[in-house]
Amino acid sequence: MRKILIDNILQSIRSGLVVLDYHGIIVYATSPAMKILGYEEEQFIGKSWGELFLHTENNSELNQIIIDVIGEEKLNLHREVSYFSPARQHYQLSVTTSYLRETKTISGIIVQLDDITELSELRQREKLMIEERQRFSLEMLESMKKISLSVAHVILNPVASIGGFVRLMMKRIDEDNPLRQYLEPIGECTGRLEGIVKSFKEYTDIKTVHYETIHLITLVEGVRPKIESIANKLEKEIRYRIDVEDNVTAYIDPVLFMMALDEILINSIESIEDGPGEIDIIVYKAACGIIVEIKDTGSGIDNKHIPYAFDPFFTTKTSNNGMGLFKVRKIITEHLGTITIERRELLGTKVIIHLPADDLPANNLMIQ
Ligand SMILES: Nc1ncnc2c1ncn2[C@@H]1O[C@H](COP(=O)(O)OP(=O)(O)OP(=O)(O)O)[C@@H](O)[C@H]1O
Ligand SMILES: [Mg+2]
């Protein structure tokens, strides 16, 4: 009675079950198992595994599981394998093995089989679709880049000539000539256009070429002369503090990373309006990697501008192009890092860069 009950339960499971004794003889199999493997009961029960399967090379993956279980006594092996039925039909099977135990001794092997052919075809199709989509977006990006570069190139030449001629005409006409009122705005606009196209070209020219392990103290110290010269140029009085935790290293492209720091510091210096301003550059190691914070006591970024701050050509300044933070974000993402900007509670703005720890190198990356 108990045996019939167990048999009924086993036969009603959708997965197929095959039991082999320790000599590899098939002593029990459920109907789903025989259906999946393509055998009738009389061709299957009592036969040895080797007799049925070992001679078929196509089923080496399935055979290997049994060999590993018997030979290497590997427990609970689970693999997805290809299987060719006696009718040469191809299936994809999910196979799990375990031991049949009687008290403490192992008396056989239980093989659980699931036909995952449809699922695996679906997965394969999905994978192909994702690959196709990725290829398509890469091609799109590549052609967008080519188009933008050509447009930039084509615009730059005529704009530069218009600008050049306007400047020449301005030099040749008298200070009080009424034509000046028309020429001056043309000069300003062409200058602006030239600036936009140039900074766009700079953006597309950004290339990570040389990654190395850098002591951040050495790199960050390099900003001192820059802060001083920009502050002088913009006639701002700046006090700054550099605080880099000892021995923090990062795997970065130092030239590019410096370019990003420069852009952030220029913004900080530009944001300082009246009187002396302060800039703090703080670098430390955290559980999630390396943190670089740049804090200023400037006018502070407007909360409603934060979502757009990293967009190309977004600026709140009258004579800037709004490309600085766009370039910075590209550099940081290429280092597998992230960057955020926030308004400080009392005064000024804070930019936070997260970089991966130096044991997670952002190696071999090329900016597209
Ligand atoms: N430290 C800061 N303090 C206040 N506002 C800031 C700061 N940094 C960025 N912003 C805001 O974010 C905008 C975008 O910055 P971004 O550097 O991209 O452009 P920009 O400085 O205006 O122009 P560009 O960098 O091309 O000269 C700025 O116009 C400004 O409104
Ligand atoms: Mg800027």
Image (cartoon, helix red, strand yellow):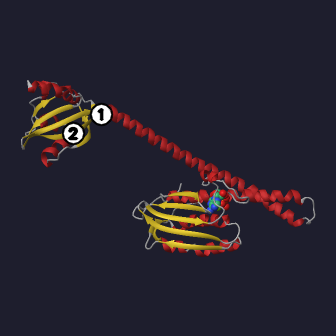
Q: Residues under labels 2 and 1: Cα distance? A: 13 Å
Q: Amino acid at mark 1?
A: Ile
Q: Is residue 252 left or right of residue 266?
A: left
* Residue lying at 78% horizontally and 56% vertically, measured from the top left: 189
Residue topped by disc 2: 96
Q: Quadrant of residue 186?
A: bottom right
Dot 2: what SS? strand
On the question of residue 322 being in view, the answer is no
Q: Amino acid at mark 2?
A: Thr
Question: Is 190 drawn above or below residue 253 in the view shown?
Answer: above
Dot 1: what SS? loop
Residue 306 screen position, x and y as percent: 61, 53
* Residue lying at 64% horizontally and 63% vertically, measured from the top left: 267
Q: In the depicted view, which residue is nearer to us: 296 or 132?
A: 296
Q: Quadrant of residue 317?
A: bottom right
Residue 91 screen position, x and y as percent: 28, 33
Q: Is residue 247 left or right of residue 318?
A: left
Mark 2 residue crowding within 10 angstroms, few (<14) / some (14–19) / many (20+): some
Residue topped by disc 1: 116
